[in-house]
Image (tube, rainbow, N blue to C red):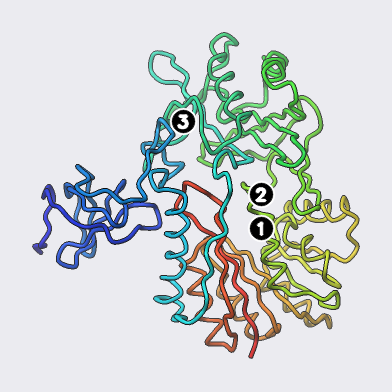
């Protein structure tokens, strides 16, 4: 079949939108082309690189008329690095595009054109916000050790000296270990041959407490130079509170293995969000941007509208972060999460904070919630914070069967949020409003909190 647009065509067009991965969208005779680096409002020259039946891809050649929101990205490896997608867009422009992203799916997928979508709650300083960095290490031909982040659209490590969205502590540890491996006689991991020793270095920092953990992910348990490496890290990061080794002996892209061995200090660090203390281990799930997490969860608490008499379900509760926010104002909170280790973390976090009105159980929400009802429990509010794929279909059916009067939906994917809202609307709920929150500045991701009521 012939297309109006052919591969290798050099064309000029206007960018009308951004995709979920930050590429500009130009339409030629109605045929959409995705162009990395182009921004809405720009006229650009581009070369078509690939055509499919419904859309194609192109390479940006020249900006004929730039957007007034275009800025010079401060990162030296942007846009080759895949960590950020829209550093070339002003922060005000980022927030507006993210609001538009949510507004568009509310109109197009949820069919809710009258539901308010508020301006995105952003950051005053949208840099150095990540409290966790996962840095892969490798050795190139000739013995050069590289560390950094994956090149956009590939599994090739870009050698990096700094990252402007991670902590300065992570920069220091990454550079120090990278430049010291040969001297220590330690081999970086070779993914193709499944050889070498050091796979990743993970740095976690408690934003409120300043406590820092360094995780050395290794291919084998035997660690000949562990004392030297511990001394090296402590020498450049005197305030480090925890250094651990995580063993991952599998040939896999999964970063962490099952065994974690303390090398220095306790096996956890602590952080505080909204006055609640959380213990964080090497493998704990914990939100990447604690400053915005407090805003996100405070919005969920606001939409829950608790008076102190309500019993609440927190589905997909993780380590209990939202649950403990809710527990401050609820009569009781029941959290459910399919990962058993996360439930153990949630119970420990509740104990650390002195909460006695929380109950956590491991299992699938669609299985556990019906049993709670059969045991005679009744719930006024249900909060969901699902993964990017959205709520499980069985959980949506469970919600519509038991019909708690208020729902709060915390989403990291506007498209699946909109899909699920349509199902819940058709089942008897009314969407009141949506509040987007910018958890990942410089990236194209946006989170949103939605308030729904039974009618």
x then y, percent, for residue 423? 52, 81
**106 left or right, relative to 285:** left
Q: Which residue was labeled with disc 2? A: 291
Between marks 3 and 1, how big is the CA–CA gap?
39 Å
Q: Circle 3 — which element?
A: loop
Q: Please tell me which residue is depicted at 70% across the width and 57% down the height of the picture.
A: 318
Is residue 29 depicted above or below 255 in this figure? below
Nearer the observer: mark 3 or 1; the answer is: 1
Using the rendered image of the protein, determine whether residue 409 is visible from the camera's viewpoint: yes
Q: In terms of depth relative to the viewer, which is nearer, 447 or 389? A: 447
* Label 3 Cα crowd, 10 Å radius (few <14 / some 14-19 / many 20+): some
- Is label 2 in contact with label 1 (beta carbons under 8 Å)? yes
Q: In the image as oriented, which residue stretches furthest toward the front? A: 68
Q: Which residue was labeled with disc 1?
A: 295
Q: Secondary structure at mark 2?
A: helix
Q: Position of residue 281 (x, y in %)?
A: 74, 41
């Amino acid at each position: 079949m012939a297309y109006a647009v052919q591969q290798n065509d050099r064309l000029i067009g206007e960018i009308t939108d951004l995709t979920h991965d930050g590429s500009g969208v130009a339409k030629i005779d109605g045929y959409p082309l995705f162009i990395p680096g182009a921004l809405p409002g720009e006229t650009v020259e581009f070369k078509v690189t690939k055509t499919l039946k419904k859309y194609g891809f192109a390479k940006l050649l020249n900006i004929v008329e730039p957007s007034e929101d275009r800025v010079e990205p401060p990162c030296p490896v942007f846009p080759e690095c895949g960590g950020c997608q829209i550093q070339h867009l002003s922060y005000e422009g980022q927030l507006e595009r993210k609001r538009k992203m949510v507004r568009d799916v509310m109109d197009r997928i949820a069919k809710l054109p009258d539901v308010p979508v508020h301006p995105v709650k952003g950051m005053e300083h949208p840099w150095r916000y990540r409290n966790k960095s996962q840095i892969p290490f490798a050795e190139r031909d000739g013995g050069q050790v590289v560390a950094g982040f994956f090149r956009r659209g590939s599994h090739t490590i870009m050698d990096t000296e700094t990252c402007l969205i991670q902590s300065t502590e992570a920069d220091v540890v990454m550079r120090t270990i990278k430049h010291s491996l040969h001297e220590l006689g330690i081999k970086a991991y070779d993914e193709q041959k499944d050889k070498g020793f050091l796979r990743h270095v993970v740095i976690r920092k408690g934003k409120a407490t300043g406590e820092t953990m360094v995780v050395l992910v290794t291919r084998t348990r035997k660690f000949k130079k562990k004392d030297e490496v511990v001394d090296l890290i402590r020498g450049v990061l005197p305030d480090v509170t925890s250094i651990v080794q995580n063993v991952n002996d599998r040939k896999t892209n999964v970063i962490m293995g099952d065994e974690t061995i303390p090398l220095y200090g306790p096996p956890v660090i602590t952080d505080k969000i909204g006055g609640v203390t959380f213990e964080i281990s090497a493998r704990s799930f914990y939100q990447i941007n604690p400053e915005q997490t407090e805003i996100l969860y405070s919005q969920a608490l606001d939409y829950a509208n608790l008076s102190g008499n309500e019993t609440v379900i927190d589905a997909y509760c993780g380590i209990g972060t939202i649950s403990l926010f809710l527990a401050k104002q609820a009569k009781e909170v029941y959290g459910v999460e399919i990962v058993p280790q996360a439930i153990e973390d949630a119970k420990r976090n509740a104990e650390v904070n002195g909460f006695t009105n929380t109950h956590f159980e491991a299992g699938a929400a669609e299985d556990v919630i019906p049993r709670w009802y059969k045991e005679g429990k009744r719930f006024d509010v249900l909060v969901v914070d699902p993964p990017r794929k959205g709520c499980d279909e069985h959980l949506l059916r469970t919600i519509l069967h038991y019909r708690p009067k208020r729902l709060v939906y915390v989403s990291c994917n506007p498209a699946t949020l909109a899909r699920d809202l349509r199902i819940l609307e058709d089942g008897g709920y009314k969407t009141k409003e949506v509040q987007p929150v910018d958890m990942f500045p410089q990236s194209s991701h946006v989170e949103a909190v939605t308030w729904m009521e039974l009618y």
